[in-house]
């Protein structure tokens, strides 16, 4: 039977790729810790990484927005934010076993045989599996397009994910990585905005990728919305309260955090902590250690790394 041997939860920010120097000393400490965490993870010699993150309106739109998606065959990166267009090796047998177990246990994944993932997933690969030596099972959580799955439902998904991995009939060592958060405010218009300057973007968000007339221009517009922010708000107090709850085992509180509470205190980007709740559901009896936390407004995000062993 397969064994879960470790886990990592890590923030992502696209501005690391395009404006690394803006992070200053805080950014250097975070990036140094990513190298340490990569070495720490590889000490466990994982055969597979289950990689949990979200999509930022690159693959999924309001014309078709699944709560949970799993890739069971081919997977490649969009190449957004100067990240490679990775051809990601997928551990297909485990992916299909997780899909089947979810269906049996009450989690109805959407699934795809041709998954495309953006920087949410590929930044995790860039820092922790850049040589693609370890095959991946990619899972995407809807953290961008309300209504979102609840924190409790994401935790339940993690519990079933653990059950699936441990019932997989292969003698393999499995690590789980979750990428997203912490507090940040993403300049994506709300779907009900009436501002004239938002309408072109809302049309694409509503009707999907076929409405993008020029993909390069769309990518440039999306990047400009973020890179024009020289210093974004970060709620350090809220970030630390989340990390404290995570490491102290205050699971019941986290499971009950509402969409509105997260939106008010952690921003629309803070909804990505749902990815961490999936990991927590799977590794709730593991020891969680915060090895890095840096509030970096220049990267528009509270940046943290937590190791689970």
Image (tube, rainbow, N blue to C red):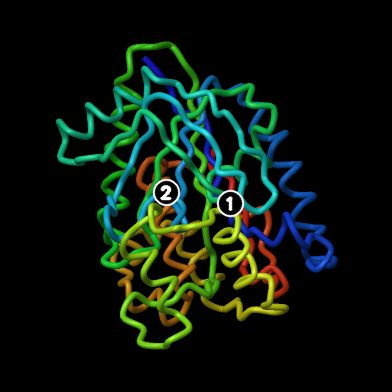
Residue 21 percent coordinates (x, y)? 84, 63
Q: For mark 2, does the 10 Å Cα neighbourhood hold few (<14), some (14 to 19), or many (20 or more) residues?
A: some
| Spatial separation of the CA atoms under disc 2 and disc 1 | 22 Å
- Quadrant where the image shows the C terminus: top right
State whether residue 112 is above or below residue 234: above
Q: Please give the count of numbered marks on the rendered protein.
A: 2
Dot 2: what SS? loop
Q: 159 left or right of 178?
A: left
Q: Mark 1 points at which residue?
A: 10
Q: Where is residue 59 in the image (x, y as percent from the top left)?
A: 42, 49
Relative vertical location of residue 47 with respect to residue 266 in this rendering, above or below: above
> How many residues crowd mark 1 within 10 Å: few (<14), some (14–19), many (20+)?
many
Asked if the residue at tag 1 contacts the one at tag 2, i.e. Cβ–Cβ closer than 8 Å, the answer is no
Label 2 or label 1, whichever comes before in sequence order: 1
Q: Name the residue under label 2.
A: 59
In the rendered image, the residue lying farthest to the front is: 213
At horizontal 81% and vertical 68% (from top left) the residue drawn is 22
Q: At x 51% / y 65%, what residue is drawn?
A: 244
Res 202 → quadrant:
bottom left
Front residue (pair 30, 60)? 60
Corner quadrant of residue 249? bottom left
Residue 103 rendering spot, x and y as whole percentages: 17, 33
Residue extending farthest bottom = 195
């Amino acid at each position: 039977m397969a064994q879960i041997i470790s886990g990592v939860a890590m923030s992502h920010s696209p501005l690391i790729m395009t404006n690394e120097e803006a992070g200053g000393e805080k950014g250097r400490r975070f990036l140094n810790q990513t190298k340490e965490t990569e070495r720490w993870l590889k000490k466990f010699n994982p055969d597979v990484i289950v990689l949990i993150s979200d999509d930022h309106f690159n693959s999924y739109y309001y014309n078709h927005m699944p709560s949970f998606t799993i890739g069971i065959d081919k997977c490649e990166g969009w190449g957004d934010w100067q990240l490679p267009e990775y051809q990601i090796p997928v551990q297909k047998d485990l992916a299909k076993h997780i899909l089947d177990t979810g269906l049996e246990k009450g989690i109805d994944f959407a699934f795809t045989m041709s998954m495309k993932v953006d920087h949410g997933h590929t930044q995790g690969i860039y820092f922790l599996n850049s040589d693609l030596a370890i095959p991946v099972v990619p899972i995407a959580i809807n953290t961008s397009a309300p209504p979102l799955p609840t924190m409790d439902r994401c935790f339940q998904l993690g519990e079933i994910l653990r059950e699936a991995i441990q019932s997989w009939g292969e003698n393999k060592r499995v690590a789980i990585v979750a990428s997203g958060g912490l507090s940040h405010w993403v300049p994506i218009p709300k779907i009900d905005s009436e501002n004239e300057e938002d309408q072109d973007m809302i049309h694409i968000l509503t009707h999907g990728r076929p409405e993008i007339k020029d993909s390069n221009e769309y990518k440039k517009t999306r990047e400009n919305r973020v890179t024009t922010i020289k210093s974004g708000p970060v709620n350090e107090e809220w970030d630390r309260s989340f990390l404290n709850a995570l490491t102290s085992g205050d699971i019941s509180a986290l499971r009950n955090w509402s969409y509105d509470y997260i939106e008010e205190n952690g921003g629309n980007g803070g909804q990505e902590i749902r990815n961490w709740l999936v990991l927590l559901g799977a590794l709730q009896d593991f020891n969680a250690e915060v090895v890095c936390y840096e509030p970096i407004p220049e990267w528009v995000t509270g940046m943290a790394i937590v190791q689970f062993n």
